[in-house]
Amino acid sequence: MDTETLAIYNQAKQKVGTATRKTAHEKGLWHETFHCWIVDDSQTEPYIYLQRRSAHKKDFPRLFDITAAGHLLAGETAEDGIREVKEELGIDIPFADLDFLGQFRCMPKHRDIYDYEFAFTYVYRKHIPFEQFRLQEEEVAGMVRVPFPAFYQLCFGMVEAIESDGFVEEGKIRRPYCEQMTLNDLVPHQQRFLQLVAISIDQLLKNERPR
């Protein structure tokens, strides 16, 4: 992955060249990513799905994160990013079924890398039973869902912990996971980014009928 070629941008989102993923993270160069948040709004209370990153990941192992996400290579469009959902979660989602929230600046805090992302951010609104997920072992080690209103409150510091339920995997063995989650259990995205995502999803859910 470190040798993948990414398109590089300045802070004004003007393309200025290309660089390897490794160089982009070492030097803090702006590049594009794809984010997909899956939200189950089939019932009265919506839920948002979070993936648990694999213990094998170099950065942020075992922390919970965006449902599916990945880097866009040089020459790719946001539509190409839909592959991340299939690769990481093992489910097929038509790109046309996604709701576009916007392109947000995302800068996870890390001691060793500077991951400066222009993130194409989408929502897929669907109830997906946990048994349908086929996780990419080297990338993802579990899937949970949390009530979206509680997730919203967590992002704004209105509560310190929320309930989650789902499963974690060790090898090919799945076991139930029902634990409280705090911000410390999430990848350390900037709180402003999480709040922007939460507000955008909330507005989407309020403006459209459940599917």
Image (cartoon, rainbow, N blue to C red):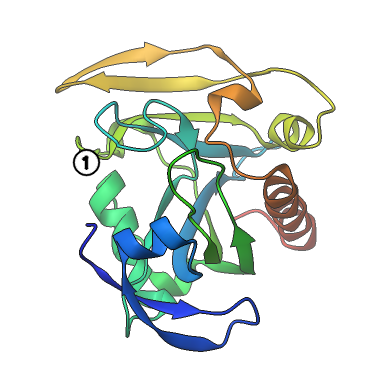
Amino acid identity at mark 1:
Gln
Q: Which quadrant: the C terminus? A: bottom right
Q: Is residue 42 above or below residue 63?
A: below
Badge 1 crowding class, 10 Å Cα cut-off, few under 14, some 14 to 19, many 20 or more, is some
Q: Residue at 21% across / 41% down in the picture?
A: 136
Q: In x, y percent, where is residue 72?
A: 36, 70
Residue furthest toward the front? 27
Q: Which residue is mark 1?
A: 136
Q: Is residue 39 above or below residue 57?
A: below
Residue drawn at (39%, 25%), measured in percent from left and top?
A: 62
Vertical arrangement, residue 91 with respect to residue 13, above or below = above
**Residue 192, percent across and down?**
75, 49
Q: Position of residue 127 (x, y in %)?
A: 48, 43
The secondary structure type at the circle numbered 1 is loop
The one of 63 and 112 positioned closer to us in this rendering = 112
Screen quadrant of the N terminus: bottom left
Please identify the quarter of the rendering in which residue 155 is found: top right
Q: Camera-side residue: 4 or 35?
A: 4
Q: As drawn, is 53 to the left or to the right of 45?
A: left
Which residue shows up at 29% across the image and 26% down it?
55
How many marks can you see? 1
Residue at the limit of the structure toward the right, as seen here = 158
